[in-house]
Amino acid sequence: MFDSVRNNKKIVQIFLALITLPFAFFGVDSYVRNVGAGSDLASVGDTKITISQFELALREHQDQLRQRLGASFKLEMMNTPEVRQGVLEALIDRRLLLLEVEKHRLLTSDNALREAISKIPALQEDGQFSMARYESALRAQGMSQPMFEARVRQDLTIQQLIGAVGDTAMVADVQAQSLLRLQTEERQFSEFRIAPEQFADKVKVETATIQKYYEDNPTLFQLPEQVRAEFLVLSLDEMLAQVTVDEGEIKAWYEGHKDRYQQPEERRASHILITADKESEKAKAKAKAESVLQEVQKSPAQFAELAKKYSQDPGSAQKGGDLGYFGRGMMVKAFEDTVFKQKEGDISGLVESEFGYHIIKLTGIKPGTQRPFNTVRPEIEGELKRQAATRKFAEAAEAFNNMVYEQSDSLQPAADKFKLKIQRSGWVTRNPDPKAMAALGQLANVKIVEALFSDDAVKNKRNTEAVEIAPNTLLAARVLDHVPASKKPFESVKADIEKLLKSQEAAAMARSSGEAKLAELKNGDADKLAWSLVRSVSRAQRSDIPVVALQTLFKADVQKLPSYVGAWVGGSYMLYKIVKVSQPDSVEVAKRQQLQREYTTIVAQEDLSAFLVGLRSRYKIDINKAALEPKERQ
C-alpha cells in the first residue's frame, strides 16, 4: 500500500493540501475531547467536531497565513464567513476520511511511522535523526511525543486511503496525443489596431453634460470623513523590553533543568529482518532466521552483504541493513533493549519483534553529552525573560483595558503607568480601501477604525476601548482632529470629468468602427487594411498574446481561410486575420509523457474530490450555523 502512495506522492500532497490544516489532525477519538452540551460545531456520522477543535484549527490556519503573508497579514482576514466555513469544511473532509480509514481498518506500522518521523528535515542533524531536536520541537509546539506520533500516524494512514483512490486515475496514450495536438496547434495571424486616440479630435463634450455627470455621481467626488489620532500599544514585546533576569536565576534554571540540555546517547545499528506477517508463518520464519544467523556467525565481516541478500526490510536491505543513528524510543522495545546492551561490533542472536526476527549488529555509539552553561545561557535568558514578560503582560492587559476606559479623556495615565510611548497617526478615512488600510500600520484593524469614527470618539474625544490587534497585542486610540465628509467643488473636478467623458466616447467610437469593419470583412468586402506582419501562436506557447486575444483567435471558425475575428483588447479594438492553421506531424514522446502525467494528476484530483462527495452522501453531516458565526468582543 505504501508503494502506491509513494508512486502518487505528488497527487497525495496536492490533495492533502486541500483538506488539511497544520497540526489540526483530529481523529475519531480526539485528544481534544468533547466538552459538553452546546459545544459541538458539527457532527459527522456519529462523531463530533467541537468548537474548541474548530478554534484551534482556525488559530493554526491564522498562524500559517501570518507566516506566508508577513507584514501583509491582517487579523480581520480571519473573521470572515468564507474563511470560517473553509476551515470547517477542511475539518469535515478530514473527519470523513478518518471514518473511512476506521471502517476499512487501515493501519500504519510503527516501522513506517519511525521512518516518516526520522526523515523530517527539521528533526535531523548532519543528515541523521536527532532526538534532541525532536524533543525541542515538541516542547516548542506544546505537544507530547505520543500526541505528535498519533497525529503523524493518522496522516500516514489517510495517505494510504488517498493513494488507493488516486491509483485508479489513468489517461490513455491516445487521449494524451489528442490533448497535445490541441495544445501545439498553431494559428498564424495578422492584426489591425483601432485605438480610441484616433477619434479624440472628433469628440466634443458640452459643459452641461459635464455638470450632469457631476450631479449624477456625487459619491465619486466625495471627500471622505477623516480623523487623526494618537494611540498606545501594549504588547508582549513591550513587556519583554522592560524585563531583566539576574545571573543567579539563569544559573539556577540551568542546574534545575540539566536534562533539557543533554544530547542523549545515540547508537547506530544494522539488522537483517526475516518477516513473519502471520502466526502460521512464525516457525518457518524463525527457521530461516536461524539459518541466516549461522552464516553471519561464520562470516561476521560479511554482515552487510548477507543483509542485502537475506533481509526483508525494504528500507535498509540495500544499504547493508544500516538503520543509521537513533536514540531511545525510536525502535520497538525488544530491538531497542538489545541494541543498548550491546558493545560496538557485537552481533546479537535472534531478536523477535512484531515484525519478525532480527539479527542486529551494533556499528556505532555516540555517547550522551551535556551542553555547557555558557553555550545555553542566551537561550535560558531568553526563555526566562519571555516567561516573565508573559506574566507581566497578562497582569497588565486587564489594568490597561480598565485604565483607558475609566480615564477616557487621555491616554497619558496609561502611557505613564505602563511606560509606553504615545504614537500619532496620519489622516485616517472612515472606509479605507485595502491599500490605504495597509498604510495605517498598527491602526490597520477594522475594529479600531470603526471605534475612531464612533460618536464617543469623535464628538466626546474619549479613548477607544483596548482592541486586540494581534496575539498578545492591545491598542487603544483617541481622536485628535476630525474633518467631516464634504463634496469637491465642481470647478476643481470639471477638467477631470471632461477628460473621462471624452475617453469614454472615443472608446465607444473605436469599438463601433472596429465592429463595422469586421462585419465588412466577413461579408467579403475588399480587404484594404494595413495588417501587421504575420505571427504564430499556440495554446502551449502564447508568447506575449493577451488572454482575451488568445481566446478570440482559438474560438474563431477556421474552416475557411482567411478568417476574421475581433475583440476589445487592452484599451483598443483589435481585428485579427487568421491566414493559416497547422498541427505537428508527430508528437515528441517526452512532451506526450509530461502532458499525460499532468493530466493524470488532474484526473486523480477529480477522482479524489468525487470520492469525498460520495463520502458526504454516505455520512450524515449537521452544522451548527449559529455557532459558526464570528463572535464580537463584548
Image: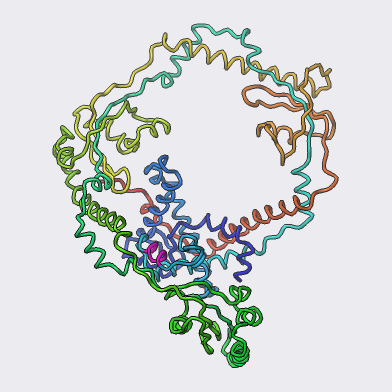
Quadrant where the image shows the N terminus: bottom right
The image shows residue 232, relative to residue 482, as above or below, that is: below
* Image quarter of residue 574: top right
Residue 137 colored in magenta in the image? yes
Query: Where in the figure is residue 485, as x and y percent of width and height?
Result: 33, 21
* Image quarter of residue 582: top right
Query: Where in the figure is residue 489, as x and y percent of width and height?
Result: 38, 11
Residue depicted at x 48% and y 81%: 344
Q: Between residues 144 and 238, which one lies in front from this camera angle?
A: 238
The image shows residue 147, relative to residue 220, as above or below, that is: below
Horizontal placement of 221 versus 540: left or right?
Answer: left
Range of residues picked out in magenta: 132-138
The rendered magenta stretch, by its main secondary structure, is classed as: helix
Q: Between residues 63 and 487, which one lies in front from this camera angle?
A: 63
Query: Where in the figure is residue 283, as x and y percent of width and height?
Result: 59, 93
Q: Between residues 208 and 248, which one lies in front from this camera angle?
A: 248
Residue 573 colored in magenta in the image? no
* Image quarter of residue 546: top right
Query: Where in the figure is residue 154, as x and y percent of width and height?
Result: 48, 68
Residue depicted at x 25% and y 24%: 481
Residue depicted at x 51% and y 80%: 362
Query: Is residue 280 shown to the viewer in this render?
Result: no
The image shows residue 580, relative to residue 96, as above or below, that is: above
